[in-house]
Image (tube, rainbow, N blue to C red):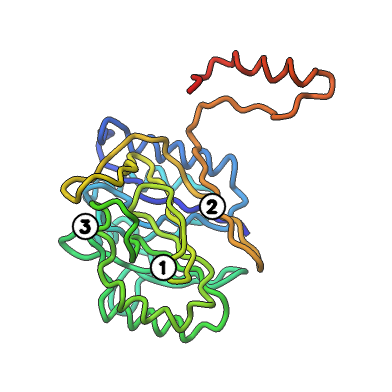
Amino acid sequence: MKFIHLTDTHVIGGGRKLFGADPARRLSLAVDSINAEHSDAAFVMLTGDMTHWGDLEAYRAFHAEIARLAVPLRLMVGNHDDTQAFAAQFPDTPRDPNGFVQYAFDTPYGRAICLDTKRPGSHAGQYCTTRRDWLASELTATEGPILLFMHHPPFRVGIAAMDAIMMLDTDPFYEVIVPHLSRIRHLFFGHLHRMVSGNWRGLSYSCMRGLNHQVALDLRAGPEAIPGSLEAPAYGVVLLDEDHVTVHMHEFASTAPKFPLHAPPDIEMKRYQLDMTHSGFDDL
């Protein structure tokens, strides 16, 4: 099975730019890429921060682009989203009995459980007792493998300003999932605006870049301000079966030259490789 992990689109309305980039345009390019290259994906999972300011105009602009997807779409909320404005534009998105934007659905290789980690009035994440009770019930009711999705990571990653706004209920959250840890195949999240992967208390995880702007890799900066950059946007291409989960980062807007690493049969290898140095691409 294949699915697409898209996150942190940060769309704003009115065709305006954000940090010098156009988030709606970048989302449009991502949709074009997914339709052209990955129309066989089972779904696109968008792990929050659809808009930057959470206003209805921005959700309309987001909807205008995302509606062009040829692949089924699953939406989640992040700290930049406004739940009411989101609901006005996407009223059919599932919620739990308490109104949180969290839900579950089955795939051929595990049940996907999508969590709502939004903490009203804060960019940090929260997973309160009510939401934890819902998750505990979902995990108990499911016997097979699990794919877990959330916006905020429940652990530090070494970038101080982002660690200050991670999901803060780390230990209570872990207490809910630890009896089921052997069944959770992978944790997917957003929020960090970087490609980050690793293992947390026995659970493998990955995060994907955002579409408009990224968090710069600066492990020396303090918590006062988030270091930003305009590294290339990307989305994740996830492949899985009974034995493995593989996550590829796809820089879909890259203009870097593409070429075969082996010469065609009728071209001598050394001459072919030397010719590629004159491709016009910057040599670092």
Sequence order check, earlier mark of 3 and 2: 2
Residue indicated by mark 1: 114
At mark 2, the secondary structure is loop
Q: Residues within 10 Å of mark 2 (few under 14, many from 20)?
A: some
Quadrant of the drawing holding the N terminus: bottom right
Residue indicated by mark 3: 123
Q: Position of residue 147 (x, y in %)?
A: 50, 68
Note whether 42 is above or below 180 in the view shown: above
Looking at the rendered structure, the kind of residue marked 2 is Val
At mark 1, the secondary structure is strand
The Cα–Cα distance between marks 2 and 1, rounded to whole angstroms, is 18 Å
Disc 3 versus disc 2: nearer the observer: 3
The Cα–Cα distance between marks 3 and 2, rounded to whole angstroms, is 30 Å
Residue positioned 55% across, 83% down in the render? 143
Q: Position of residue 226 (x, y in %)?
A: 23, 45
Residue positioned 48% across, 42% down in the render? 31
Sequence order check, earlier mark of 1 and 3: 1
- Nearest to the observer: residue 223 or residue 230: 223
Disc marking residue 242: none
Q: Residues within 10 Å of mark 3 (few under 14, many from 20)?
A: some
Residue indicated by mark 2: 71
